[in-house]
Amino acid sequence: VARRRPFGEFDGIDVLRQRLTTPSNEVAVVGIGDDGAVLRRPSGELVVSVDASIEGVHFDLAWLSLTQAAERSFHAAVSDLAAMGADALASVCAIELPPHADRRAFAEIGKGQARAAGLLGCPIVGGNVTKGSGFGFTTTVFGTVPRGRSILRSGAEPGEEVWLSHQAGWAGLGLHLLQQRLATRRGRAWDFAPHLGRWTHAAIRAWTAPRAKLRESATWRRKASALIDTSDSLASEANHVAKASGVLMVLDHALLTSTHRPVTRAAIELGLDPLTVVLYGGEDYALLGTGPEKNRPVGALTVGRVERGRGAVLLVEGKHQPLRPGFDHLQVAR
Amino acid sequence: VARRRPFGEFDGIDVLRQRLTTPSNEVAVVGIGDDGAVLRRPSGELVVSVDASIEGVHFDLAWLSLTQAAERSFHAAVSDLAAMGADALASVCAIELPPHADRRAFAEIGKGQARAAGLLGCPIVGGNVTKGSGFGFTTTVFGTVPRGRSILRSGAEPGEEVWLSHQAGWAGLGLHLLQQRLATRRGRAWDFAPHLGRWTHAAIRAWTAPRAKLRESATWRRKASALIDTSDSLASEANHVAKASGVLMVLDHALLTSTHRPVTRAAIELGLDPLTVVLYGGEDYALLGTGPEKNRPVGALTVGRVERGRGAVLLVEGKHQPLRPGFDHLQVAR
């Protein structure tokens, strides 16, 4: 009887390769399978970014299927291209798997990555597979911008408005539901604590299935002076823009409250401080931009103003309260 | 008394940034510090590759300092650019650190990465820092080749020679010394089992401090029809070339023996089968190439011949023995 060879790295790569359709050769001359991929000469400047999503740190497999975890990690990585005002070009994915990973694990990961890559038009042209202590996805994304047209954190000017592409805090609420076991996964469905309202679906979706805002970015980049995505928290990203631009970012309590009613109501239902949820919840992957009022993109939520000064503050009844940077992956216990 | 804030992600990034000198703006318009780096439009096609080096899987901190581990991982990643015949352009590094990592850990990692990036002319323009269960380095490298000039695995032709840039097996011997505790690290020095010859230094250096063969590649790419690096094993890489090119790769026992005397003698001293060490030892990061005899690069070791057929074999006294692909990161217990 022939001894069955254990499922290994090369088998896994084959399974992944079947899932990841070869990108059109408009992008890649050489795709998965050689020592590196070869991409046609980009049409402009090249934007590159890398993002990691690690089991036990960034996600828990009680909360996400492997397919969802892979898909989520891909959107998180591509969100940085949106934050630069870039068009997606291609990506490479490094995967860590625990020793017990089997064919099905590879297939699920490939499915999630392929779905995200397809939706975002960001083909996976290469990768790496290695054993680890758990599952991990490290995704490097490449994008293009016309020369000199990337939108940096450093472009904010006093007198401009501060915009959000969508309400902050939903993903933070979703994470809270998961951590407090107020939401439990049952296959593809969710059981919620019975006393909670219908908003729970939105909160869970925000955390489990964020979408990189590439399409919004294609509009915003023609309007915004500075751009960043809220991967950490609104407070944290506002501080980043303030520091890079040498300005004071003033988030306005009244504007935040009026634009964030649904999320603040949900926070109150959970007994949480609504402003903390909006300002310090992470992983919304919203676009945060600044620009002149006349440029305000359709659908943008105006949440503050850029002023002369340094740092980020919250304006409450005419007074400035400091906004600590907040949210740090190495410090936050998950 | 002010409470000292624990050392976190942003502090670590600051320490890394100090180590990683900003690359000349000939390469990067925007370096570390925004959502992504922005590189000038590459001069030709873009080669991309990603490689991961994980504590407990690829290395053990009893064998390498953090600086060495970071340096080694960077060379391993850039080796794939050499294997494509590409010039190094830039890189991004995703780092995982255990919760106890402190300022010194970041400084050591930055030192190793900066040293390798400087030596190889491959500036680090961005990265990602995250908590993990141990240390891990996932490095994505970008290179350039003139249009259509990447050297693939698929170009080998019957009648050509098979070349190695340097002796295979040394790194495998080094790993054996480490695993069997025949070599133990004492700061920057090594203690070796007293009965072993002076070759132990070469073996340890081969495993702990491999060098990406970018300079050799700049010559080989004008000579070779197919190119790969021996990150796994000679047997494994020969099989890859055979499969991609649709040829029979014949490694010649007599040629291997005559070109690998020092490493085979060392193997015998350890009681190991010398041919197994040469064929199945991993992580030498040598260039393995094929090409017509008249193109043989200066210093190349000729170890076999390309013939019509499929697969990879060892030629011993006129007979072909199959060469199993061998070496698989997910299967090999370290």
Image: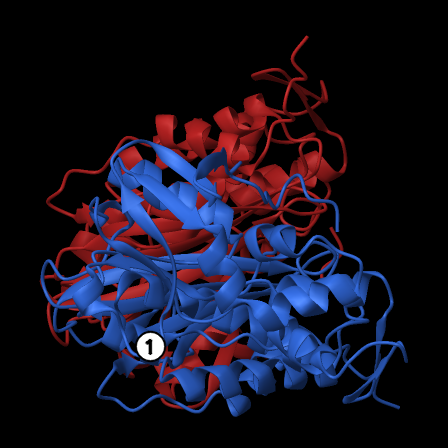
Chain colours: A blue, B red
Query: Farthest residue in the top direction?
Result: B1
Question: Is B256 on the left-hand or right-hand side of A294?
Answer: right
For residue B170, above or below residue B44: above
Question: Is A139 on the left-hand or right-hand side of B166?
Answer: right
Q: Nearer the viewer, residue B331 or B137?
A: B137
For residue B186, above or below residue B184: above
Q: How many marks?
A: 1
Question: Is A34 on the left-hand or right-hand side of B172?
Answer: left
Q: Is residue A169 visible?
A: yes
Say what amino acid the circle numbered 1 marks.
Glu
Q: Secondary structure at mark 1?
A: helix
Tell me where residue A22 sits by quadrant.
Answer: bottom left
Question: Is A60 on the left-hand or right-hand side of B140?
Answer: right
Question: Can you give x and y, in whole percent of width and height, for residue B210 in the image?
Answer: 44, 40
Question: Can you give x and y, in whole percent of width and height, for residue B24 in the image?
Answer: 15, 38
Query: Farthest residue in the front direction?
Result: A317
**Pointer 1 chain:** A
Q: Nearer the viewer, residue B287 or A103?
A: A103
Residue picked out by circle 1: A216
**Which quarter of the rendered picture does the N terminus of chain A lie within?**
bottom right
The residue located at (30%, 72%) in the rendering is A217
Q: Nearer the viewer, residue B323 or B82?
A: B82
The residue located at (48%, 40%) in the rendering is B72
Tell me where residue B38 sits by quadrant.
Answer: bottom left
Tell me where residue B140 sits by quadrant.
Answer: bottom left
The residue located at (57%, 73%) in the rendering is A72
Question: Can you give x and y, in whole percent of width and height, for residue B132 in the image?
Answer: 67, 47
Q: Is residue B259 visible?
A: no
Instruction: Tell me if mark 1 has few (under 14), some (14-19) or many (20+) residues whose alpha carbon lies within 10 angstroms of its own.
Output: some
For residue B9, above or below residue B93: above
Question: Can you give x and y, in whole percent of width and height, for residue A151 in the image?
Answer: 22, 58
